[in-house]
Amino acid sequence: MQEIGNKIDFGYDSLDEAFPPCDPGVEPLGSRVIVQIRTPKSKTKGGIILTKEAQETESYNTQVAKVLKIGQLAFKNRNTMEYWPEGAWCSPGDFVRVPKYGGDRWTVKVQKPDGTSDEAILIIFDDLNLVAKITGDPLAMKAFL
């Protein structure tokens, strides 16, 4: 972990480390979108074990998420069921910015490459609550405390 001012760099090695593959165990209904927020690291590259408080701070401050599933009515006019003129704002696999608060949160167990398990944090948002599609490197975006 590297701290620069109020910016904390948790130093992920890959997208799979930050967003481990997982099955949310649910299908989104209506206009809802399921996203997976960046999984907080449990230790630094140097081997220092991070406190639960530091991990929780990272999970609640991150606004970077990977789109996992999209409901059937997402990005559609609710009256005509036609897609919005600009089309879908994102697709499964895209990375987006999400609100810091809100949504329905839960965790699911995931297997890490080293054989240990961790938890992925998932959130359901309404399609209108997504803030932006990330066009750059999602790992380059840092949490600000």
Image (spheres, grey):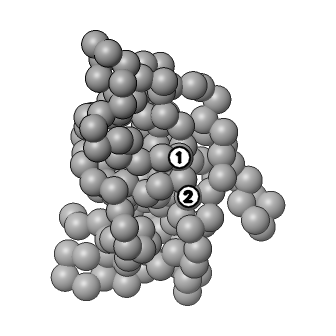
Residue drawn 25% across the image and 85% down it: 4
Q: Front-most of 95 and 73? A: 73
What label sits on residue 19 in the rendered view? 2
Quadrant occupied by the N terminus? bottom left
Earlier residue among tags 2 and 1: 2
Q: Is residue 56 visible?
A: no
Quadrant location of residue 127? top left
- Of discs 2 and 1, which sits in the foreground? 1
Q: Front-most of 123 and 52? A: 123
* Secondary structure state at the residue bearing disc 1: loop
Q: Residues within 10 Å of mark 2 (few under 14, many from 20)?
A: many
Q: Horizontally, is 37 left or right of 21 in the view? A: left
Which residue does the numbered mark 1 point to in the structure image? 92
Q: Position of residue 28 (x, y in %)?
A: 50, 25
Three-letter residue code for mark 2:
Phe
Q: Position of residue 112 (x, y in %)?
A: 71, 60
Q: Is residue 5 visible?
A: yes
Residue ranking furthest to the right: 115
Q: CA distance from mark 2 to mark 1?
A: 13 Å
Q: Position of residue 129 (x, y in %)?
A: 26, 37
Q: Horizontally, is 70 left or right of 13 in the view? A: left
Residue drawn 37% across the image and 84% down it: 2
Q: Is residue 31 above or below residue 92?
A: above
